[in-house]
Image (cartoon, rainbow, N blue to C red):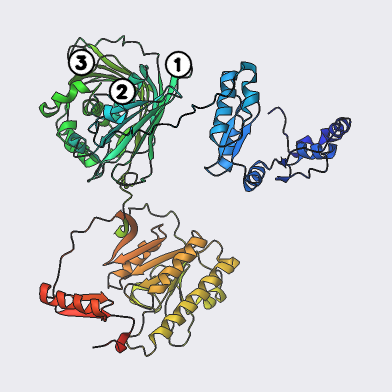
Amino acid sequence: VSHAFHSPLMEPMLADFAEAAARCSFEAPRIPIVSTLTGALVDTGRPADAGHWVEHVRRPVRFAAALTALYGHGVRAFLEVGPDAALTALAADCVPEDVVTLAALRRDGDEERDLVTAVARLHAAGTAVDWSAFFAPHGARRTGLPTYAFQHERLWLEAGAGGGDADGLGQRATGHPLLTATTELPDSGGAVLTGRLSRASHPWLADHAVHGTVLLPGTAFVEMALKAAERTGCDTVEELTLHAPLILPEQGALAVQVAVGGERDGRRELTVWSRRADTADAPWTRNAAGVVSGAPEAAPALALTDWPPRDAEPVDLDGLYPGLARTGYGYGEVFQGLRAMWRRGEELFAEAALPESARATAAAFGVHPALLDAALHVNLLDLPGGQAVLPFAWGGVTLHTGGTDTLRLHLSPSGPDAVTLTLADATGAPVATVRSLVARPVSAEQLAGDGDDPLYRVDLVPAPVRAPATATPTQAVCGLPVTGPLGAGALATGPTEPGRAANGGPADTALDAPHHADLAALTAAGPVPGLVVLAVPPAPDDVPDLPGLVRGRVNAALDTLRAWTADERCADRRLAVLLRTGDLTHAPLHGLVRAAQAENPGRFLLIDSDGSAAAGPALAAALDSGEPEVAVRDGEIRVPRLARAKPGGPAVWDPDGTVLITGGTGGLGALMARHLVTGHGVRRLLLAGRRGPDAPG
């Protein structure tokens, strides 16, 4: 905007604006109006005076509140009246999905078409339209229906018509291995191409695994985008950015859609979506988006007919794929197609070919994704730090000739982290050009989801290697306050004195640091150290009142955590709570500390120790791990991480186990019990019923 409306910067002009506005005539509104000044209905009996409009200039616009008020009064259609759709998208974000938001006009649009479309959409949304006024300039009139009753005739197609093929489903077959059918969109002139992908229907895709996860290669996204461009009269994939990996599940298939929008200035937007095909109402994932156009990239000026390239040095490829496997690339036979490579300065040349098992399908592709992926392996030889990378953004991709099973590749830098590709067939004839390709690193954690909406569990894994801290915080050890059978004993960390032994406390809290009875004693002794270890003593072997002991420890721990967060002297300090694995009295403290961590990030550390003889030396490393929660197991530091839960095997019937029958004390329960004993050899039954011991028998 030209001025900082609705801000204090408008105050110098408010007086002049009020004077000008006062010269206007104001009337009370004749229809209900919701003001964006108040976000509520305007009093229809009082006109808006000059002061109202002065406030409009100065105060914030309560746009969302106004739309919410209208929705509360039953409004379900919002029409923006103006030269462009400036607020339509914002309005759609402020109201529920059942509301229609549309604009009367759009910049650079066909004015008459836009207005008629807006009226039609309002009518379709249930808004009353004055059709007599709409058709008045055209002389239209209503026509009566025939006077005879309609003859009812069933016109439904019989089940099975079409046999499930694309034509029978109202689509057109594409003949493409990945996108098998297409549907034109009459309103926009765009199209939707669809397909189903699985390891069963496309077994060669299982040969493309990264960090143990089978995913669709980036070259397959380019192949699908090129096919979608062809079906909509375009020649070039101007840009294509990958947003989310398309991960192929071990079982089942994925439904894939490539949506191509309407043409605008010779360009069309393109989006790739996927979801589980065998799960009802599965959510769609936006995997990639880009733009296709009708302006093809020129054929490459560089000819690849002189082969091998002159003045280029051969590169030894022995051990290439075993080395890539160590980096995280699990390429199977179909993707191990790189045959030769040459280097000339910063330029790379390569030759790739499909294995015999995949050559029969090459003619159905523009460029077989496995073939193009194999040619790109030349860019993986010099990976920094051995980190896996995947194609992320493509630009200016044009297919000149398709169907080859052999590729010649020329790769040269085109910018920071970007390369240009020229592709030819075995004779040197141009196949495709790529103006820009950018790759990005990918980690196993980024690919942890398997596209299945899986179940997860928490696993304890070895802690990552951490660089030594430049400055070790001062440490001290303290125990819980003594309450009843609780007892004291533990550890805190203040200025570390080399060679000083721990002054008492459990074996797995043997830190070289001052020890204090509890937090109160620690704070009374002087400045609070940078790191304090709160060591909770183990439960005694013989406890007459175990529930009472648990309650006492939880209350004592809660008081300590509250005191820690409330004391300003501890504001920039960290409290490590040391618990013992398998101790029933410690179990509820895990949840208590995690709740404190959620409310006070960075101020608490949870340590779970097995209490073994090797735990003591590992404790110092656990305190310096940088993790919010660690576990000490046999002297090794472990940290919790989410891991995919593997599906269990089929349930095994065990007649020696105990069978629970709910409602087992009634008549049907007795019959079921007798059947299990006589027919299935069950020997242990547990009958549960609402009548308990009063049940008959």
Q: Is residue 529 above or below residue 256?
A: below
Q: Give the CA separation, mark 1 to mark 3.
A: 30 Å
Q: Is residue 108 visible?
A: no
| Quadrant assignment, res 168 | top left
Classify residue 36 by image quadrant: top right
Which residue of the protein is positioned furthest toward the bottom in this rendering?
544
Q: State how far apart marks 2 and 1 are (Cα).
A: 17 Å
Q: Where does label 1 land, which residue?
A: 266
202 and 411: which is toward the camera: 202
Q: Identify the residue shown where x is 37% and y is 13%.
A: 296
Q: Earlier in the sequence, mark 2 or mark 3?
A: 2
* Marks 2/3: CA–CA distance: 19 Å
Viewer-proximal residue among 342 and 142: 142
Label 3, on which residue? 425
Q: Quadrant of the N terminus?
A: top right
At 46% across and 29% down in the image, what residue appears?
148
Q: Residue at x 31, y 85 (%)?
A: 692
- Image-based side of 34 in relation to 249, left or right: right
